[in-house]
Amino acid sequence: MAASIERRQREEAERKQRIFNAKFRSIGIDKSALDSQIAEKELIKQNEAARQREFDEQSLFFSTFLKQQEIERQRQHHLLEKQDKEFNLTFLRAEQRKDFDLSDPLRLKKDVPARIGDDDPRCGPSSLQKFDGEDLTAAERVALQQAQMAEWVRQKISEKEYMKQEERDELMAYVQQQEMFTEIRRQMEQEQAQRNRDAQVATRDANLYLAEERRLRDAQDRRVEDRSAQEDVMHQTTSAFLNEDPAKANSTFGPHRVVKYEWKGMNRDQMQEILNTQEAQKRERALIQEQERQREREYELQSEACRRLLIASQREMERKRNQLRANVRDYQKSQDQEFKARYAHLNQVVYTNPPAEEYFTQWGTSSR
């Protein structure tokens, strides 16, 4: 008997697990497989994030290194150009050449004239080379000024040309640097895209494998469920417990006792007795509620009487405070009038004899 009861209880527990678990009955989700798939995806995301961080660090390192190299190259280039310009301006001037006199445009102007100065020994008494008012150095001075102006203009033109060439070289170097950076970035993006494609292919293959595995597992589960459903139908059609046989609830200890796990409900007389008891409880509860409402009405009447008494007491206290303020105001007014009268008496009666000039001049005239 005990073994049969234990077996029925075990079967009922297994049946509850099959029937009342809505997740597995209606959805059919394999939670363990989903958890493993989620864990694999999280691992893939973490690996991809680590690769991305490594890629970013490498990109930052290469970018910093290339910028430093470019800055050093530009500094060396500018230094060499500056040294070349200083050397050219110092040692390679046109007028310092050995054959400059052959191509000198001012060669005729630099020739020695027929007379140099007023004391030229070449001019004798009858040479007629010396006249009043002449300025022999005017042409030399004008030529010197023109030469200086021309030299300044040539230097300014050379400097501007040098600055333009330097700007063109810097622009060309910047363009080359940008092209190099663009090429490096393109290569890195291609590598990243290839890695992404490889990861997608791996994910697709893993998903196909998981889908096939799930299909096989679902087929096996459906076969198990079909076999279990057939067994359950057979059990329901043959079980006395599920068919609710009233005879199984009768106890061997007397008609007033039942087998609890076999009992399926009360009869009509028992249910009517419960209804009568509930009706009596309702009437008793209604009487208690009426008494409670009566007590609340009495409490409200008492509260209203207390409120009115408090209002009357407050009004009496307010009347007394107003009377006290009026008395204090009248007293202060009488005190003010008394002070004004006393002040007028002192000014008009008491202090009517002001001291004369002799009163102030007698001080310091005697030792007494």
Image (tube, rainbow, N blue to C red):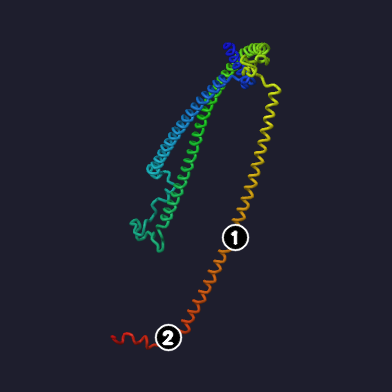
Q: Secondary structure at mark 2?
A: loop
Q: Which residue is mark 2?
A: 354
Name the mark nearer the viewer: 2 or 1: 1
Identity, as a three-letter code, of the amino acid under mark 2: Pro
Instruction: Give the class, few, some or many, for how many residues have Cα within 10 Å of label 2's Cα (few <14, many ≥20).
Output: few
Instruction: Give the class, few, some or many, for how many residues have Cα within 10 Å of label 1's Cα (few <14, many ≥20).
Output: few
Closer-to-camera residue (51/14):
14
Q: Relative to 325, say whether 47 is above or below.
A: above
Left or right of 58 in this view: 200: right
Identity of the residue drawn at 41% across and 56% down: 141
Position in image of residue 79 (x %, y %): 40, 39
Position in image of residue 92 (x %, y %): 39, 42
Identity, as a three-letter code, of the amino acid under mark 1: Arg
Position in image of residue 346 (x %, y %): 46, 81
Identity of the residue drawn at 63% across and 18% down: 258
- In terms of image quadrants, where is residue 360? bottom left
Identity of the residue drawn at 54% across and 69% down: 327
Left or right of 65 in this view: 332: right
Residue 283 seen in the current view: yes
CA–CA distance in space, label 2 to label 1: 59 Å
Q: Which residue is mark 1?
A: 315
Q: Secondary structure at mark 1?
A: helix
Position in image of residue 216 (x %, y %): 61, 13
Figure quadrant of the C terminus = bottom left
Q: Relative to 364, say whether 265 is above or below.
A: above
